[in-house]
Image (tube, coloured by chain):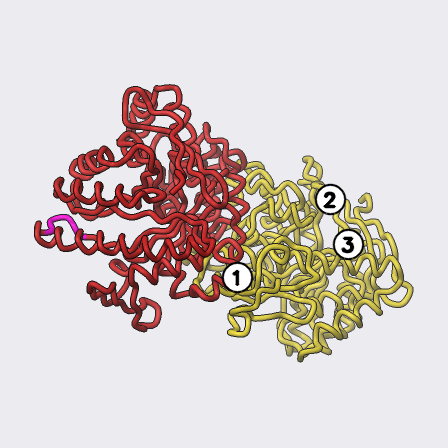
Chain colours: A red, B yellow
Amino acid sequence: MEEKFTLIHKDEHSHARTGVLHLAHGDVQTPVFMPVGTNATVKALTKDDLEEIGFEIILANTYHLYLRPGPDLLEKAGGLHGFSKWNKNFLTDSGGFQVFSLSELRKITDEGVKFQSHIDGSYHMFTPENVVDFQAKFNSDIQMQLDVCTGFGTEYHDAVKALKQTSSWATRATAQYEKHVAQGYRGLLFPIVQGNFYKDLRKQSAEFVANLNPGGIAIGGLSVGEPHDIYTEMLNYTAELLPQNKARYVMGIGTPDYILDAVEAGIDMFDCVLPTRNARNGSYFTHDGPIAIKNAKYAEDFMPIDSECQCKVCRNYSRAYLRHLFKTQEILASMLASYHNVYFLNNLVKEIRNAINENRFNEYKKNFLTRYFKGK
Amino acid sequence: MEEKFTLIHKDEHSHARTGVLHLAHGDVQTPVFMPVGTNATVKALTKDDLEEIGFEIILANTYHLYLRPGPDLLEKAGGLHGFSKWNKNFLTDSGGFQVFSLSELRKITDEGVKFQSHIDGSYHMFTPENVVDFQAKFNSDIQMQLDVCTGFGTEYHDAVKALKQTSSWATRATAQYEKHVAQGYRGLLFPIVQGNFYKDLRKQSAEFVANLNPGGIAIGGLSVGEPHDIYTEMLNYTAELLPQNKARYVMGIGTPDYILDAVEAGIDMFDCVLPTRNARNGSYFTHDGPIAIKNAKYAEDFMPIDSECQCKVCRNYSRAYLRHLFKTQEILASMLASYHNVYFLNNLVKEIRNAINENRFNEYKKNFLTRYFKGK
């Protein structure tokens, strides 16, 4: 297929790189952080907030949207864009991870995965083919294949079995995806590299996936309970196996330190619920590390959350007011904290892109993290 | 004192009137609906939302703000405006009604009212003087006197006693208020007409309050359990007793039918939590009556909430999407419903003002209500 990713610049001193992903709802500058909009809304933010901040892509969850409001209704509504009126890009996951984490029952066969809804206990089946169909009905700009994820400590022969299934499902998903493309669907399909923590399996998986010549590649099976150094090692190892001309996506990364590590490894895309979930718990990112706004020391603190942040929360409100909103359980507390946190990460990746383009990524990372962890 | 209210036009066929209230943070067109921002935030809305809609004044609750974050902190923050960054007007109540409705204990003496915090059970005392002090620390643009409210069915001699106390407290509040004015405070103090459902007491109270030559007058002791026709009769009776050159405020009115009745009686100002509270319960105002968005019939309804409404919710989103947000308990459901409901009421009072200025208020009211109640 026509390449959807343009590599702009590779940092001279690390694997970090900048690029542009060409999607159906506009270009996306990479590295990019994508906020999570599980139910076709990023929690406590409007689409206008996201546009104002400058996001070019957000994520939504296939598992949730499949159950409510359902693929058929979404198709009638004009896809996720027509439904939510977010007119930039949507990336959707395959639903496999939520089946694993939310569903009561999960039974994997060669055909697919059977599960019970966490809402009403009803039975459902995800197959490599039908999750492609669902995501095509969503009109997702990037969709993920259904894969089999294994935990840290999985035996080699189980990891082999899961990888075999994942690879077979990637082939089936690709075939189904091609049918939709032939009918005019303009989204991309990303297959997923698995292989647990076995390097030979990772290598095998990376080569298999690259041979599918996909629109981009996701790295799965990380952040599944392993120590941080093993995570970093496997992330770097896997990233290096991937072709330079494909966008690389790692799921579930959403704190400045993890983002910086991933960028250093040559990752282009990441998403996480953490910035908005933590926001609802009163935790704000700052250049000097996260702060818990409920802390009594902010009661009479009339400074902004972060004096260097240019977001409308920091330009308008004091820590004292934000603490008051949190203590009185006002919805505005969640709204403002979510806005700040996703703004902060979007600004971080902007600065990262500039640093990469000027070959000073390592210096930027070091300075950022030194200050970020100073209080620790 | 210098008159703070300019009467613009009196409708030729009713008591309805338009005017302008000149306050420290800008002029307010009347009749006006004021959204309630209990904790110095209107629930689920930003100050920018309120400005965008065109509000010129919002309400905040003295009882809540006295307990959290407290008058001293608010004073340090630059009053309610400095704290919340809402830079138009604030009206605050005296806290007396919340003592009545929220507090465990309420003991009224000549000195004032003793109560227990609903948050931590601590003991507090509101007096006519200290609630003026608190509201001056808030820098409220309009503050209310502490009064004694009685329920429907109160015996005559108890109503007399409560009125006597209310009048005495009005005098004491005014004296305390004058001290703050002498020190540069620019807010207004509204005394409150009481007298339960006894016309002679209402008359006595209205005359007493008018003689204080206040910045405006509130009518209290209504919506306390009485039948609707008695409410309307007493509202009309009391309003007619008041001087034409003072703004008139009735608390707790926030549905189109009650607003239209109040305007017809010659009331200029009203507030209510209902539009935002109902919004959080999925109830939206429309010209054809309120709708409950959770209803299954809206699941595939891709029309806006109200096709004639120009608000950004109606211009952007479908009933199907808003229902989905409500069913999945997304915060955005509360945000968008609150926005629409207060926009709807603000638009209603705008249309009411135009109708009054063109001497067609009765016709406007009739047409609006015929359609509003058609489905009932």
Q: How would you classify the magenta stretch by its main secondary structure?
A: loop
Mark in front: 1 vs 2: 1
Query: In the rendering, at what x and y percent does residue A188 appear?
Result: 39, 47
- Does the magenta run of residues contain A70? no
- Residue at label 2? B23
Snapshot quadrant of residue A112:
bottom left
* Residues drawn in magenta: A150-154
Q: Left or right? Give the position of A109 relative to B214.
A: left
Kind of residue indicated by mark 1? Ala
Residue indicated by mark 1: A77
Q: Which mark is residue B102?
A: none
Label 3 and label 2: CA atoms lie apart by: 12 Å
Image position, residue B191 (x, y; %): 71, 56
Give A327 or B343, whichever is nearer the viewer: B343
Q: What residue is drawn where x is 38% and y is 34%?
A: A31
Q: Which residue is mark 3?
A: B30
